[in-house]
Amino acid sequence: MPPGLGAAAAAEALRRDGPNAVPEERPHPLRHFATRFWGPVPWMLEAAIVLQLALGETTEAMVVAALLVVNAAVGAVQERRADAALEAMRARLAPQATVRRDGAWESLPAAMLVAGDVVKLGLGAVVPADVRILSGEVALDESMLTGESAAVRAGPGAAAHAGALVRGGEAVAEVTATGPRTFFGRAAELVRIARAEGTQERAMVAIVRLLAVINGAVVVGMLAYAAATGMELRRVLPLVLSAVLATVPVALSLAFTLTAAMAARALARRGVLLTRLGAVHDAATMTVLCSDKTGTLTRNDLAVAAVAPLPGFTEADVLALAALASSDSGPDGVDAAVRAAAVGAAPSRYAAATRHAFLPFDPARRFAEAEIASTDGALLRVVKGAPAEVAALSGAALPAEAEALARQGYRVMAVAAGDPAAPLLAGLLALGDPPRPDAGELIARLRALGVRTVMITGDGPATAAAVAVAVGLRGEVRGRETVTDSAPPADAVGFAALLPEDKLRLVRAFQRGGHAVGMCGDGVNDAPALRQAQMGIAVSSATDVAKSAAAMVLTEPGLGGVVAAVEEGRAAYRRLLTYAIGTIARKVELVLLLALGLLLTGHAVLTPMLMVLFLALNDLITLSLSTDRTTASARPAEWRVPVLLMAGGAIGLAGLGFTSGTMIYGVHGLGLGTEALRTLTFLAVIFATQAALYATRDARAVWRSRPGGWLMLSSALGVAAAVGLAMTGTLMAPLPPRVILGLGLATVAYCLLLDAAKRWAFPRLGLD
C-alpha cells in the first residue's frame, strides 16, 4: 500500500497548483446590476418614464426612475445575500474524498486533493480528480462525461476521470490531475446549486398575466370612454399611465427570493441544507414522504444479535466467513457490524484464510462476495447477502429460522462458502437496528401536517412489517411485486425488498395518483428517484451523487429535518399566499377605482405621481411579509388560481367600496376640490391596503395573531410617510388633520369588518 503524500508536501502542492476546483466565472457586478433593468417589469416602468417625459412631467419621471433604481438596488442586494447563503450551503455540501496522508487514511474535502495523493474509490463515490488505478477494480459510469451509458471496468493502470461515478467494486488510485487540469474540466459539477422556479412562482406569474389582461381591457374601456366624450389626449394619457403603473408587480421577484432565502436560513439553523431556493416552496406542497428505513426510521446502529449456523459450520465459522465477504473499511453499517462481531468471536478454521478478490454489495444482485484461499490452499467462494438470493446460489432451501428472525424485526443475512459454482449455505446472521426514539412522534407530526409517510426498504417484508409497527405505521407492508405504474394502494404503509429502480417507479406511481412526493435516499442508485420527486431528500449519510440529485440535504439523521422543511415551507406558503391575495386585491381595486373615478369626476383620481408614491410606500413595504410571524398551514400547500382570484377579487371589491365611498364623501360631504380629493383617495388606498394586509395575513382573528416586528415597523413607517406628505402638502395637496383622523378611524372599522368576513370565507375556500 503506497504511503501517500506527507502533510507538508501536500500543502506545498496545494499552494503551487491551487484547489481541486474549477473557478466559477462570475459577471462583473456592474454588468450584473445592469441586467436588472431588462425584463417585463423594468420595461413597464421605463415606458412610464418615457411617457411622462413626453408629457413634460419631469418630476414624476424622476420619481419613477428613482423607484426603478431603488428596486434594482434592493433586488441586487437581496440576490447577493441569497447567493451568499447558497454558497455557504455549497461549502457545507462539499464532496469528501478518502485520502492517504502520512501513511494513514483520512477524509478530506475533495478540493484539497493534489497530484500524487493516494485515494480510495468505493461504491457510490464520485471520482474526485483524474486518477490512475493502483490496485483493485471498479465499474465506472461516465455517462455524465461522455454520454455512454454502459459501465466501464477499470483495473490497475487504467485511468479514471473526475466526475465519473463508481457503480461497483473498490480500488486504490493515485491522483494525476486536479481542478482545471482534469481531462473534462468542469463537465460535471459534483454538487449542483440551482434556483428552480417553484409552483408558487408559476402561479403568481399566471395571476399577474391574467390581471394585466383584465387591466388592459379596462384601459381600452377608458380610451373608448374618452373618445366618446371628446376628452383631450393630454388628459387621457396620465389616466392611462396611472392604470399601467397600477399593474406593475414591482416587488414580485423580490418577494419570492426574500421569502425563500429567509426560510433557507431558518432551515440551515435546523440542520437542513437546500441545493436550490425553490425547494422551500416544494416542501410546502408535499403530500407523501417515501422514507428509507435504515438511519431515518431506525438508529443505523447495527449489531449482530444472533447467529444461526447450519450443519458443518459453527457460529465462529459463519462470522469469519461473513467478515471475509465484507469491506475492510468504509461507511457500510452492515459490514462494520459483521467485522466487529467477528473480532470478538471464538477461533474459526477460516480465521487464517486470505482474501484474493472482493466484490462489494451490489443492490441489483443483493449480495457481496469474495474469493479466499483457506489454510490448505483451496480456493473458496464466499457469499453474504439477502437470504433468498444466497440460498438460490447454493441450491438449498431457505431455513425456517430466516422468517422467524425477520418477524422479530431483525435484518437477516445468509452466508455461503465453498465451490465457486455451488457454495454451501453456512448459516444466518440476524442484525438488530432499533427504531429511533423520536421516529413515532415525528411521523405523527407529519401526519398532522397532512403528509403520509411510507417506509421503503430493501429488507424483507417480515422485517419491514415489524419496524413499521414499532414506529407507529399501521397498515400493510407490500412487496416489490406490488410496485406498478399505477397509483400505489392507499392502505400501504411500506414497501419491502425494493431494488433501486423500484424506488423511481414508486415515486412516479404516487405522482400519477396526484401526490407531491418527497423521497429520501442515500446511494448513487437513488439519484433518479431523488431527481424525479418534487422534494428529493439526501439523508445525512448520503453519497455525493445523492446530494447532487437532491433538493434538500439533511445534516442529522432522522425525520426531524423533513418536519422542519415542511413547517418552514408551509410558513413561507402562508406569507406568499397573503402577498398573492394582496396583489390581486390591489390590482382589482386600483384599476376599477381609476375607471370609476373617471366616470364620477371626469378626471384621474390618482395621478401618475400618486401612483408611483403608492408603489414605493406599499409594494416595497410589503416585502417585510417575508419576515412575518406566521404558523404552518395544517394542510399541504395548493395554489388554486381560481380560488385566489375569487378571494383577491372579493377583497379588491371591498377595498373599492371603501375607497370609492371615501372619494364620494370627499366630494359631497367635505366639498373637496380636485387636488385635495386626489390626496384623500391616495390616503384611502394606502390605508385600505394596509387594513387588508393585516386582516388576511392569518386565518385567525386579527387580534389573535401577532404580526412580525419588521412588518409592523415597515407599516408604521409607510403610513407615517403617507400621512406626513398629506399633512404638509408635499407632492400633493394638503389635507386637514381631522380628515386624516376620521379616515383612520373608518379604516379600523373596515379592517374589523373585513376580518369577520375572512373568518367566514377562508375556511370555506380552503385558505385556512
Image: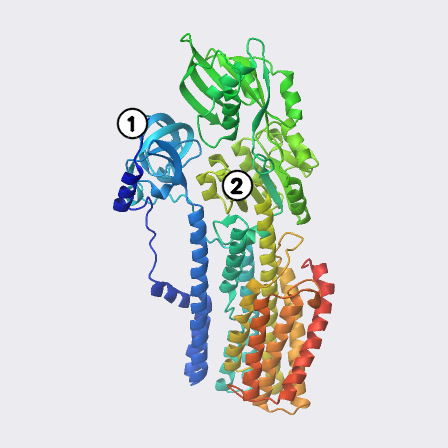
Whether residue 183 is visible here, answered yes or no, is no
Whether 588 is drawn above or below 293: the answer is below
Mark 2 or 1: the one toward you:
2
**Badge 2 local density, few (<14 within 10 Å), some, or many (20+)?**
many
Where residue 694 sits, quadrant-wise, is bottom right
Give the amino acid at mark 1.
Gly
Q: How far apart are marks 2 and 1 (CA)?
A: 35 Å
Q: In the image shown, does 602 or 94 lie closer to the viewer?
A: 94
Q: Which residue: 51% across, 25% down?
A: 340
Give the amino acid at mark 2.
Val
Q: Name the residue under label 2.
A: 539
First in sequence, mark 2 or 1: give its number.
1
Placement of the C terminus among the 4 image quadrants? bottom right
Left or right of residue 329: residue 426: right
Outermost residue on the left side: it is 16
Whether residue 451 is visible here, answered yes or no, is yes
Where residue 426 sits, quadrant-wise, is top right
Q: Name the residue under label 1.
A: 157
